[in-house]
Image: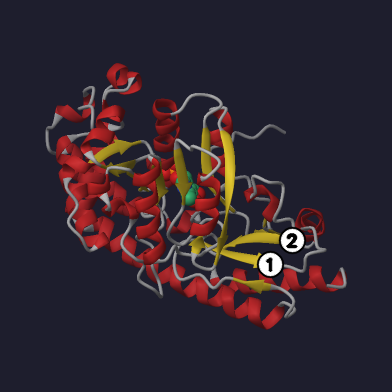
Amino acid sequence: MSTIQTTQLNLPEGMIDFGVGQPAPSLLPLAALREAAAHCLSQDDASLLYYGANYGHGYFRLALAQFLSEGYGMPVEAEHLFVTTGASQGLDLICTLFTRPGDTIFVEEPSYFLALRIFADHGLNVISLSTDEEGLMIEALEEKLAKHKPVFLYTVPTFHNPSAVTLSATRRERLVELSQQHNFLIVADEVYHLLAYTATPPPLLGSYIDAGTTLSLGSFSKILAPGLRLGWIQGAPALLERLAKSGLVDSGGGLNPFTSGIVRSAIELGLQAEHLSCLKATYRRRAAVLSAALRQHLPASVTFTEPHGGFFTWLRLPEEIDTGALLTEAHRHNVGFQPGIKFSSRQGLRNCARLSFAFFSEMEIEEGVKRLAQVLDQNNF
Ligand SMILES: Cc1ncc(COP(=O)(O)O)c(C=O)c1O
């Protein structure tokens, strides 16, 4: 029987797949967006239906700057914001405009696996840098800089996908200094910065505007709804100008003016802030339940990084365990995860796994961890 697919997700009935790194449908704010859309469409503003201004709709950028100033706890200027259709598109556009096939870029090990796909689409030469509990290791970066000249370094500095770690304030400063000395861009994927539960992260890399080397990606996918396809890039005017003058924007106009209008209403009516605080309360509880269940049910040989924000927990199993093979076994127990190798650009991390606590309820999370424990138990781990 053929079925009509309406979303990217195709989850088998009864499966608790911790590999799903997105919110459950019950966390999507349909009512709030209905109200925001009604408010927006009652304004008689036909500009939303026209080709947009190159940097994004002006009033939306002003509302976004106000929202981010409050959320980031620092002043954000509208002229430092370029509107995208999400972090993925922002990343793709940066690759299009700043790189040529064969150019070298640096990524973290582990790195967000779908960003690696975008870099592959652009034929980039990807070199990975080791990380630890404080994020990217500066010594590893210095060592690679002695041998290579990257166009940019891609990092998820806060509540990392997949490793859950946050780059320390000292390392952020050093990273920015090195980017100026060695003339490379920092492409900071900061989509989880506003999702802090039990720790306040250091200032975002997007705040180093004056350095002129940072481009910070943000997205409504994580704080409102991924289907909106709306995000932003924060950076110095000279860098944003490259984006605003791209062929893509010249031809199609500034990105997503219609959705920008609806989200502007969501911001101005306070619906965005309300939804974000509801998400944070829910995810904070889910993260705590996941950590407690992992401590209670998994063997001591499995370690994990406690999440203080974002969507993820990163498991480290004993070296000899291949989580790719383990996943086949896990699926027989109706549980899943993302195997570590997906996040490696060196074919490593085979003993690691990414779990997300964003999709499932607290009860399902507890049950899923029990199933994982059974899988490990039956495989004598
Ligand atoms: C680190 C990171 N960057 C980007 C994205 C995708 O963002 P968007 O939906 O805005 O394209 C995700 C989603 O999982 C992510 O985790």
Rendered position, 64 above or below 253: below
Which residue in the structure is indicated by mark 2? 351
Tell me where residue 62 appears, x and y as whole percent: 15, 45
Q: Identify the image quadrant of residue 327.
A: bottom right
Would residue 181 be seen by someone viewing this image from the given angle? yes
**SS state under label 1:** strand
In the rendered structure, the answer to whether residue 6 lies left or right of residue 87 reads: right
Q: Identify the image quadrant of residue 204.
A: bottom left
Type of the residue with mark 2: Asn
Tell me where residue 277 appears, x and y as whole percent: 32, 66
Residue sitting nearer the eye, 87 or 276: 87
Extreme-front residue of the structure: 146
Residue sitting nearer the eye, 108 or 380: 108
Residue drawn at (59%, 32%), measured in percent from left and top? 120
Type of the residue with mark 1: Arg
Q: Which mark is residue 208?
A: none
Which residue in the structure is indicated by mark 1? 316
Rendered position, 134 above or below 149: below
| Total residue callouts | 2
Q: Are marks 2 and 1 in contact (CB under 8 Å)?
A: yes
